[in-house]
Image (spheres, rainbow, N blue to C red):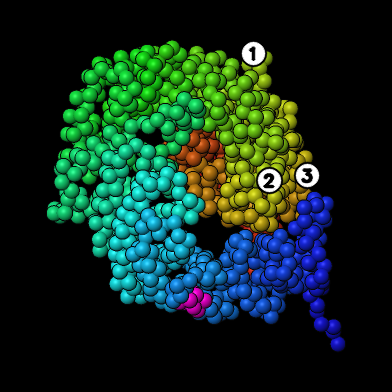
Amino acid sequence: MNAPRMGPVVQNVNPEELLNVISAAASQDPVQVRASSDRLKQMFEMFGTFDGLSDIASQKALPLAVRQQSIIQFKNAALGHWRSRKFLSDEARTRIRARCMTFLDEVDDTIAECNEFIIARIARTDFPTNWPSLLTDLTLVIDTNLKARYSSPTIDPHVTLMLRRSIKVLDEILKEITSKKMLLGVKTMANMVDYLHQSLYNYYEELSSIFTSTLNPTTVGLPRTADDLLLAHLVYKCLVKIATWVWNRMDKQGKEEFHRLQPWLQNLFQTSALRLQTLSELRINIIKAIRASNPAPDSTTRHSIDQLSRHVRLLGKFFRRLQQLNVSRFVEQPMCSDIVLYYWSKVVEATNAPSGMISDSNEAVYPVRFLVQAMVLFKESLAQWTPTPKKGVPNSNILSQQFVEDAVKLLVTRFIPLNPADLENWMSGPEEWVNFEDKENEQWEYELRPCGERVLMTLCHQYNDYVVPLLETTFKQLVGQPTVDLSSVIQKEALYCAIGRCASRLKDVIPFNEWLEHSLVPEARETNPNFPIIKRRIAWLMGQWIGNDCSPANNPRVWDVLVHLLQDRGPGTDAVVRLTAAVALRECVDSVGFDANVFAPYIAPAVTDLVRIIGDADTMESKRRIAASLNAVIERAEIRIVPLIPTISSALPQYWSSAGDDYLFKGILLSLITVLVGACREHSSMLGSIVVPLLHESMSPGCITHLDEDALLLWQTAVRNTVTVESVNGAPALIDLFPLLMSLLRVNLDLLGKIIGIMESYFLLGAQLILQTSAVDVFCAIFEPLANSNTASINVKDLIIALNLLLQLAPASQWGEAMHNSGLFAHVINKVLESKASVLEITEFMHFLARIAIADQNLFQNLMSATATPQKTEEDMYEELLEVWFARVDNMSEPRHRKLTAMAFASLISTGRPKVIGQLFEILNVWQDVSREIDEALEQSAIEGSNSPLRRFWDQDEPPSSYYHETEGTPEYDRRRALFERDPVRTTQMMPYVAARYEEAKVVCGGEEAFKKQYLMALTQVEARKAAKGHRPLPVNLDVLGEIESYLYPQLGHSNHR
């Protein structure tokens, strides 16, 4: 009888040792901590460790640090193995779940927060199947303690603690379950919604009504008020998760089952809107009253105000989330318009309040985050009041012209101008400030000024007829006024900002060229110490106006201004202006209306100063942004950049060295050099002193993981654009990198496609030079990925295509022996004969073999002979190879490939090998099929004796676009074109070639009679094998030879040679 199979033996943990290890881990002794950490890792592999950790954390008699350490270790280690029977039994899981509920009165916040996370993660897998009582137990705790709290005039801290902990646990559970996307998780959440939605709403109504009715400057300092605010806030967080989930499900499949919750959701929305207005007003009045009477409130008062501010903001987050998920349904909710306009009224109210009431603090009368939230909600809801909605139906519920104009004035005069904090940050850290400013697309929902700009843009879009005339009038009033003091400078900067933001709407009413000539050019040259503010905005405005195609970049004054701002180092400017000008320059040269001829006189100063500013910049982020601008200028300058190569290349090594481990900046530098090489084209050979060393370093072990793709792109661009791989003026040469390329080809499968592309470019540049020095290395390097089973089929195809190029570019004497010694030929033959490759791969292999055959048929014979083994003789190989070849002709999609195959068969016939001659019937079929498909003839002048080309009716003058590998515009394109044009398949007329090879076969066999005898013997063997396999044999006679000769010679005007 066989013994039962046993799994791995797992030790049981020793509870006493576990306690000692945890105690040591919680100690202050580093030696004990290290030792206990190592032992704990071992104990995690023992059965019962997680149960023990939970038990230790629950023992309140133990030191707090030990309990904290125990529950943290449980949270970090146990949850990932919760379902594993190796570490936990069902009984242990039951004990842990029960133990978790005992932490609901835990005093320590660290332990309680870990427990909240643990319960939620366990609930994700166990509720409701293995923990069906979780929700009922929690709601029972909440119900019981709510009644106890509000039925007694005195407050029991234990009751408050239980409420706080249990509601937080419920919030974490909802957070976990709402994230489940699978059907089972959705059903679980739907059941939770059914069970909780009304009770949670009732909790919130009860809690919020209590403090709403009693909240005033006197009661706000009571501990009970702070607790009431916190509990209501926690309950509302749960409500928000449920309501948001239901709202989102109403747009998905199966939404009908959630429509029954629509009345509840609308009621919650309306209640939240009313609470928001009430609590916001209470909060503002309380803070104003406290500021007036008590400038330094106590900690309880401050805590209550902080909690009230958070709760008001949570109400706004709820509205914002619903708006983000479905704005059309959001605006249809009851009181939506009221709440949005209320928010905007607070924005207006804040601007009219005394200074100091707006700040980024929860204790401010108007916190920045509240105002930003208000503006975002207002902005995203403006579409509901647009005069012409998308549906085309006139809207009767629109904002008045006065309202819109007041809003625009408010934004332009109060929110968009730079404030003292902005100017202080500008002066203290100019580069950091401007880089932060330019991240506006990421931060506009969190900062007042960027948000104000977005609101203005939306107003201009929705109320174009009101906003455009207002901004036009304001522009005409202010543009000509003198700007001397700081306040007027700041206000003009805000106007320029507004114009730039609404440029696409204002381009038809603001005469940009006139404004540029009479205002922007003089202002850009002003030396007033306050004018960096204006100059920065002018540079930014140029980028916006030109970059958004509001005006074409064909006015030289645009480049006058930008280049001046870029290079000016005198009074009235600073680093912020130069950095902004650099960024604006990129936006302008990248515009659709860019005119390179207009920009040509400014290329040299722009490039010179961009290179200089990169060196002057203090932060890597600034260097990256300026380098990106230089990149754009070089790309647009194209061949005009050649005279500036020394200016650019002389600075790059220093920038590279100073970058250190900032691989992002190094990647940008590689991209910069790539663009420079591409722009210089055939002149890029002089950049070898920069390109070669940087590629060596980029592909070194420490850098390759960060820079490999950028480096390979530079490498590819360099070899495509150069005219030689050899050294120019003694500089490092691209040929020096070829051994590195071969080493990458052997090992780097992830980037194999790009590596093969670079190798092809090397072949096209100097195949014979490469094979003279490293032929065996080349074929060995190609062989390794070919033989690797993990190499993608498309890469195998690319490798064979690269080999085909090599065979055309160098004589057979250079590659034949190396191909054999590397094992590559044997590998290809075995792949073909054993059919161990895909149809695509085998077809490419046949093209490869055909190239060898037409290049040198004797070499082909030698390679086949050297590959033969006692188990697979040379004659067997020929027989099987031809069978595969005949079967694959129909897989060749292009006429040139089928002609190549027909020519290869003719070349093999010329060897006189019996196995080949015996298949003349099949080969004749191929020749006939191909000759019927193609139609080619010599030009008349060629017939008369000149070298005029072959007229190919079967082929187009251009190869497939894939042949060029996106090399258009580079010297490699010409190299590929030239190789294509001199391909023997294109330059050789097929039928004369076949006839000549056929005659050669007769000579090799010893004359015509000997050839016929050889043919009959070979045919006898072929047909005998057919018969043995059950196929119908052909009669053994000379009919096929007669058919071949009558087919070949009459077409060529010869007499019958039989």
Residue indicated by mark 3? 866
Q: CA distance from mark 2 to mark 1?
A: 36 Å
Task: Give percent across and percent down for residue 781.
Answer: 71, 39
Q: Is residue 377 visible?
A: no
In this rendering, the answer to whether 556 lies above or below 213 is above
Q: Is residue 283 above or below residue 780?
A: below
Q: Amino acid at mark 2?
A: Pro
Using the rendered view, name the quadrant where residue 543 is placed: top left
Q: Position of residue 1 (x, y in %)?
A: 86, 87
Magenta span covers which residues? 139-148
Q: Residues within 10 Å of mark 3 (few under 14, many from 20)?
A: some
Say which of marks 3 and 2 sits in front.
2
Observer-nearest residue: 224 or 932?
Answer: 224
Q: Earlier in the sequence, mark 3 or mark 2?
A: 2
Residue at image position (80%, 52%) is: 29
Which mark is drawn over residue 785? Answer: 2
Q: Which residue is at the front of the view, 1007 or 693?
A: 693
Q: Is residue 387 left or right of residue 733?
A: left
Q: Is residue 1036 left or right of residue 124?
A: right
Q: Is residue 208 left or right of residue 167?
A: left
> For residue 345: magenta?
no
Q: Residue furthest front?
A: 293
Q: Is residue 44 visible?
A: yes
Residue that carries the numbered disc 1 in the rendered image: 729
**Residue at 64% from the left image edge and 13% from the top image edge:** 729
- Residues at circles 3 and 2 in contact by the CB criterion of under 8 Å: no
